[in-house]
Amino acid sequence: HRDLHSFPTRRSSDLQAVMAIDTLLSSLVAAKQVNAAAAQAIRPDISDLYRIVRDPNAYRSAEFRAALARVAVGVRRLQ
């Protein structure tokens, strides 16, 4: 039963992480710290993250971590 109680919290935390990534990327583009075209290349992966956390019945932590790793690779390429 403990896993069931932590499940919504983990998904909620993951959703907050996606929103933070999205907001930060938009802010960096607006401040011209990051090239808009390069940032746009990461957007499909961020959309995947949103899709993964949207449905609580379909949420899979492993799928989220894999998509998050793709976003991290894209962000590192921005530097």
Image: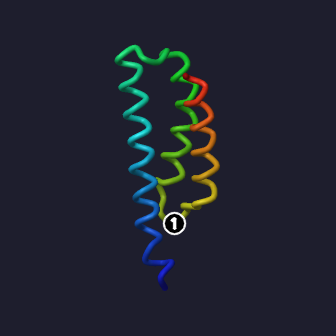
Classify 10 Å Cα crowding around label 1: few (below 14), some (14-19), many (20 and above).
Answer: few
Where does the image place residue 57, in percent across and percent down from the top left? 51, 66
Query: Which residue is rendered at x = 51% and y = 78% of the image?
Result: 3
Farthest residue toward the front? 79
Q: Which residue in the structure is indicated by mark 1?
A: 57
The answer to whether residue 64 is left or right of residue 35 is right
Where does the image place residue 73, in percent across and percent down from the top left? 62, 34
- Residue 44, relative to residue 58: is it above or below? above
Query: Which residue is rendered at x = 48% and y = 58% of the image?
Result: 55
Where does the image place residue 74, in percent across and percent down from the top left? 60, 30
Judging from the image, what secondary structure is the residue with disc 1 in?
A: loop
Given residues 61 and 44, the one toward you in this image is: 61
Where does the image place residue 50, in percent across and percent down from the top left? 48, 46
Query: Which residue is rendered at x = 58% and y = 38% of the image?
Result: 72
Given residues 60 and 20, the one toward you in this image is: 20
What's under tag 1, amino acid-wise? Asn
Given residues 56 and 11, the one toward you in this image is: 11
- Residue 69, relative to residue 59: is it above or below? above
The quadrant where residue 9 appears: bottom left
